[in-house]
Image (cartoon, rainbow, N blue to C red):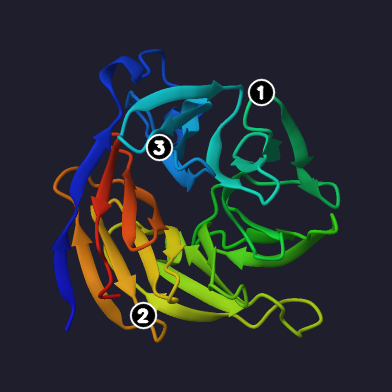
Amino acid sequence: MTLHLTAKLWTKLPDELHFRGEPTEWVKMTRPGQNLHSFLEGPEFDSDGNLLIVDVPYGRIFKIDPQGCWLLHKTYEGEPHSIKQKGDGNFVLTDYKNGLLEYDGIDDIKTLATEYKGEKFKGLSDLTIAPNGDVWFTDSGRTSLSDPTGNVFCLKSDGSLIHVLDNVPYPNGIALSPDGKLVYCAATRANAVWRFMADYPDPKWPMVGTYIQMSGGLGPDGLAVHKNGSLAVAHAQSGRVYIYNIFGDTLAVIELPGGLWVTSLIFKNDNLYIVEAQTGSIYLMEDMEFI
């Protein structure tokens, strides 16, 4: 039986941190005619227990303490979509405008990759870091069912860049199974989550299957995997999150009491933190032992 649940508001972007300038090119492209106070994505808990959130159009990184208090941690010239902390304490960023970046957590940002074999990335979206240090990331640009040429890359721990997929209709959220053996990729414009082996034996492209086929909304955005292997999917522009078990069965549907732009999520133990960009809110679903 599928559970129907409602998350509660944990914290919300304070009014004094709302952006009040002119729309950027990213805003004009993705939300024509709108003025956005923010567009929040890519949550990550740092080693001190703070939640880091990126603000795509305005190049901002926010830090939220365990009590839900916000700090503007960093501003730079970019369009960050996701942030993840490496084992050495530094962070990796996917930036739609600047490519794959490394951030020392204080001030310095350096470029890891902007292209593959002389061809610039289309516009990076999400990333995840494997237990062995490999960085998996998606390159969506403006791809869709009419142009299914979105990419998935893997920056190996030895520094080599591997082109894993080139046929995804808007590759977005990406996550790994707890053992790092399976890769889940949100094919947003196909309204599906794809799955393939991380260490695939095929000489060129991995064999890929549809793990979850969704409907409605815009499609799956951010993904998060629980320690037991269950998959949480942020369903963009539908105001809800779906939880699936390792067989792809629907365990739960989590509704948000406000806002439809569910972009991303992250587990911390059995608690699920959900990012909603329309209202600049972080919602919380506690004590999810049932999954």
Residue situated in front as seen by the camera: 122 or 249:
249
| Cα distance between the residues tagged 2 and 3 | 27 Å
Residue situated in front as seen by the camera: 34 or 105:
105
Q: Is residue 164 above or below residue 128?
A: below
Q: Point out the tag, 1 or 2, that comes first from the N-terminus.
A: 1
* Quadrant, the N terminus: bottom left
Q: Position of residue 228 (x, y in %)?
A: 43, 76
| Cα distance between the residues tagged 1 and 2 | 40 Å
Task: Look at mark 3 in the image and give the residue it sits on.
Answer: 40
Q: Position of residue 180 (x, y in %)?
A: 61, 72
SS for tag 1?
loop
Name the disc covering residue 245, or none: 2
* Quadrant, the C terminus: bottom left
**Left or right: 111 in relation to 36:** right
- Which residue is found at the position 56% from the left and 32% from the top? 79
Residue situated in front as seen by the camera: 163 or 47:
47
- The three-letter amino acid code for the residue at tag 3 is Leu
Badge 1 crowding class, 10 Å Cα cut-off, few under 14, some 14 to 19, many 20 or more, is: few
In the figure, residue 77 lies in which quadrant?
top right
- The three-letter amino acid code for the residue at tag 1 is Asp
- Which residue is found at the position 37% from the left and 28% from the top? 38
Residue situated in front as seen by the camera: 66 or 226:
66
Looking at the image, can residue 268 be seen?
yes
Looking at the image, can residue 169 be seen?
no
- Which residue is found at the position 71% from the left and 81% from the top? 200
